[in-house]
Amino acid sequence: MAVSERGARERMVFSAAQLIRREGVASTGMREVAAHAGAPRGSLQHYFPGGKEQLVNEAVEWAGRYAGNRVARFLAALPEPTPSGLFAAMVRQWTEEYESVGFAGGCP
């Protein structure tokens, strides 16, 4: 599903995961998440009555599912799945990704 096809809630969880990845939890504000997601600020209280803690928890859960699915895709693409082959494939992808964003996309 493309980002633009996601609802406001899903965009905010995704945006929180991206901002936390770049800036860390302490430096990621709720208003920044709403702005990044293109969602009204009032929707924060509507969708996340538990505040920042709820949003961060959901963003971490989303990131965990994403990472698990990504590992599964890497494994499926390997002709002979081995731990070292999986690690090498993931490191190649991470290196390409981090270089393409000027090393600004890492997790603090």
Image: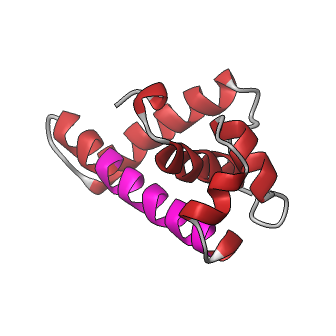
Q: Quadrant of residue 51?
A: bottom right
> Horizontal and vertical percent for residue 48?
58, 67
- Name the quarter where the C terminus is drawn: bottom right
Q: In the displayed structure, would residue 45 be above or below residue 12?
A: below
> Horizontal and vertical percent for residue 92?
48, 33
Q: Number of callouts in the render?
A: 0
Q: Residue at x 82, y 67 (%)?
A: 26
Q: In the displayed structure, would residue 24 be above or below residue 78?
A: below
Left or right relative to 76: residue 5 = right
Q: Residue at x 48, y 26 (%)?
A: 4
Left or right relative to 31: residue 70 = left
Q: Residue at x 70, y 26 (%)?
A: 101
Q: In the displayed structure, would residue 20 be above or below residue 39?
A: below
Q: Quadrant of residue 73?
A: top left
> Horizontal and vertical percent for residue 1?
34, 31
Scheme by which the image is coloured:
secondary structure
Q: Is residue 22 visible?
A: no
Magenta-drawn segment: 54-70
- Between residue 46 and residue 73, name the one nearer to us: 46
- Between residue 65 and residue 101, name the one nearer to us: 65
Q: State yes or no: residue 57 in magenta.
A: yes
Q: Residue at x 40, y 53 (%)?
A: 67
Left or right relative to 47: residue 71 = left
- Between residue 95 and residue 48, name the one nearer to us: 48
